[in-house]
C-alpha cells in the first residue's frame, strides 16, 4: 500500500518563463534581429559620444602646468541627459533581475517596475542638471592654440564643428586619413556631420515615436476598455487626426513658429502629436479583445480596482502590436526627418541636409551624398528588419 502513495522529491524550484523571456528567446534565434539590434545600439552609442569622436574641444588640456578637462564643461545638459538615458537602457536588464523577486511577490511586472525606477532616476538627475549646471559657452580656440598647450588630448578626429573661412581651403576634399569620409562644400568633416546627424535621427525616432505611442496607448486603453460614449468620441477624434496631412502640417508650423523655437523639437512634437492614431487603433482593438477574457471577468468579480486591471493585466497583454508598430514607426520618422532636411525645411544637423548638399555636385562629391545615403539606408533597414523579427517573435502561433 505504501508503494502506491505519492512521494515528494525536493529539488530546485523552476521559475516559469515570462512572455518577455519567450519572445527574447525567439529573437535570439534570428541572426538578422540580433545584427539589427547591435547596429541600433551602435548608432545610439556614437550619437551620445559624438563629441569624443570628432570635434574641436579637447578631452584633456594642460597649459602653464594646470590640467583641465574642457569637453566636460562644454557638453550641455541635454547631452548629459542623453548619455544617462543610454546607460540606463543598457542597465535595464540588470535592474529587472534585481527587482524580480519583490515584483513577483507584489504580483507586478518586474520590467514595468524597473522601467519606472530608471525613469525616476533619469528625470531626477536631468532636473538637477538643468537647475544647478551652466555649460561653458565661451569658445576656447583650442585647435588654434594647440601649440601653447603642454599636452592636449583631442577627439579621434580633431576638426571644427563650425568651420570658419580658413576651412574653405579644405572644402570638397576626397577621403583621406585625416578626413576618412572627406569634407563638404564648407570644409567640414563628413564624419562629424554623420555623427551629429545620427543624434538627430535617434532623437526624432525615439522621442517622437515615444510621444505618439504614449498618447495612443493611453487613449486606446480608455476607448477599448470603457467603450460606449467614450469610445465613440475618441474614435471621431482619431479620425480627424488621421485626415491631417502630417508633412503639410509640419511645413505650416515651421513657417509660422518664432525663430527662438528649435526646429528639431518642433518637428519631434508635431510627429508625436499627429502620429498616435495608429497606436490608438491597435491598443483599442487589443483592449476590446482582452476585456472579455475569463481572467478579466474573474478579476472584476474579485473587486480589483479598474486602474490595477488596466496597468497590471489589460495594457501589458495588449502591447505586442504596439512594439511592432513602434519599431516600424521609428524608421518612418527617421525617413520623414531626412526628407524634410533634404527639402531644406529643417535647419539642423541631419543626414538629409548632407544629402542635399551632395546632390549639387553628384559626380564631384560622391563621398558626401554616398555617406548620407548609406547612413539613411542602413538605419531604416535595421529598424525594418528588427520590426519584422519582433512581429514574428510575438506571433501566438510560434513554436515554443
Image: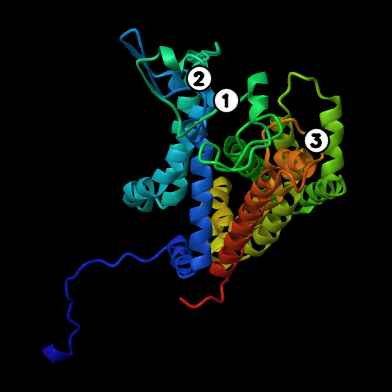
Nearer to us: label 3 or label 1: 1
Residue at the limit of the structure toward the front, as seen here: 169
Across and down, in percent, residue 168 comes to 68, 26
Q: Kindly give the residue lying farthest to the top in the view shown.
A: 64
Closer-to-camera residue (8/142): 142
Q: Which residue is mark 2?
A: 143
Residue neighbourhood size for the residue with mark 3, other residues' Cα within 10 Å, grouped as few (<14), some (14–19), many (≥20): some
In which quarter of the view is residue 91 placed? top left
Q: Which residue is mark 3?
A: 344
| Picture coordinates of residue 119, whole percent (x, y) | 48, 36
| Lower position in the chain sequence, tag 1 or tag 2 | 2
Q: Dot 1 corresponds to which residue?
A: 160
Query: Dots 2 and 3: beta carbons under 8 Å?
Result: no
Q: Quadrant of residue 324?
A: bottom right
Q: Nearer the observer, disc 2 or disc 3?
A: 2
Residue 136 rendering spot, x and y as whole percentages: 51, 14
- At 39% from the left and 65% from the top, the residue drawn is 17
Front-most of residues 138 and 110: 138
Q: Earlier in the sequence, mark 2 or mark 3?
A: 2
Image position of 55 with respect to 287: above or below: above
In the picture, residue 248 is in which quadrant? Answer: top right
Residue 353 appears in the rendering: yes
Q: Farthest residue in the left direction?
A: 2
Amino acid at each position: 500500500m505504501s508503494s502506491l502513495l505519492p512521494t515528494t522529491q525536493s529539488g530546485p524550484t523552476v521559475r516559469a518563463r515570462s512572455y518577455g523571456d519567450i519572445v527574447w528567446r525567439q529573437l535570439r534565434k534570428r541572426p538578422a534581429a540580433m545584427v539589427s539590434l547591435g547596429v541600433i545600439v551602435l548608432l545610439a552609442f556614437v550619437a551620445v559620444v559624438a563629441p569624443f569622436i570628432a570635434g574641436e574641444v579637447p578631452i584633456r588640456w594642460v597649459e602653464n602646468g594646470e590640467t583641465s578637462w574642457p569637453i566636460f564643461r562644454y557638453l550641455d545638459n541635454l547631452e548629459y541627459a542623453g548619455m544617462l538615458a543610454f546607460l540606463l537602457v543598457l542597465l535595464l536588464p540588470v535592474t529587472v533581475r534585481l527587482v524580480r523577486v519583490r515584483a513577483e511577490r507584489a504580483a507586478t511586472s518586474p520590467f514595468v517596475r524597473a522601467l519606472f525606477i530608471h525613469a525616476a532616476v533619469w528625470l531626477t538627475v536631468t532636473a538637477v542638471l538643468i537647475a544647478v549646471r551652466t555649460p561653458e559657452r565661451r569658445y576656447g580656440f583650442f585647435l588654434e592654440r594647440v601649440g601653447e598647450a603642454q599636452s592636449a588630448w583631442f577627439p579621434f578626429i580633431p576638426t571644427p564643428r563650425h568651420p570658419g573661412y580658413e576651412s574653405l581651403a579644405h572644402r570638397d576634399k576626397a577621403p583621406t586619413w585625416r578626413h576618412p569620409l572627406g569634407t563638404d562644400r564648407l570644409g567640414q568633416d563628413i564624419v562629424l556631420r554623420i555623427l551629429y546627424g545620427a543624434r538627430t535621427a535617434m532623437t526624432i525616432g525615439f522621442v517622437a515615436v515615444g510621444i505618439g505611442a504614449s498618447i495612443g496607448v493611453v487613449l486606446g486603453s480608455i476607448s477599448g476598455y470603457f467603450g460606449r460614449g467614450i469610445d465613440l468620441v475618441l474614435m471621431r477624434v482619431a479620425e480627424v487626426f488621421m485626415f491631417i496631412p502630417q508633412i503639410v502640417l509640419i511645413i505650416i508650423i515651421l513657417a509660422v513658429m518664432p525663430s527662438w523655437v528649435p526646429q528639431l523639437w518642433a518637428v519631434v512634437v508635431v510627429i508625436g502629436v499627429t502620429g498616435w492614431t495608429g497606436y490608438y487603433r491597435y491598443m483599442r482593438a487589443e483592449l476590446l479583445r482582452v476585456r472579455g477574457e475569463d481572467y478579466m471577468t474573474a478579476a472584476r468579480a474579485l473587486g480589483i480596482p479598474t486602474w490595477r486591471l488596466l496597468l497590471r493585466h489589460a495594457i501589458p497583454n495588449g502591447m505586442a502590436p504596439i512594439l511592432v508598430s513602434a519599431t516600424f514607426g521609428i524608421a518612418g520618422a527617421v525617413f520623414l526627418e531626412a526628407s524634410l532636411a533634404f527639402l531644406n525645411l529643417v535647419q539642423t544637423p541631419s543626414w538629409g541636409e548632407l544629402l542635399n548638399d551632395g546632390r549639387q555636385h553628384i559626380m564631384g562629391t560622391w563621398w558626401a551624398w554616398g555617406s548620407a545615403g548609406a547612413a539613411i539606408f542602413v538605419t531604416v533597414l535595421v529598424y525594418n528588419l528588427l520590426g519584422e523579427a519582433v512581429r514574428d517573435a510575438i506571433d501566438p502561433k510560434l513554436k515554443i
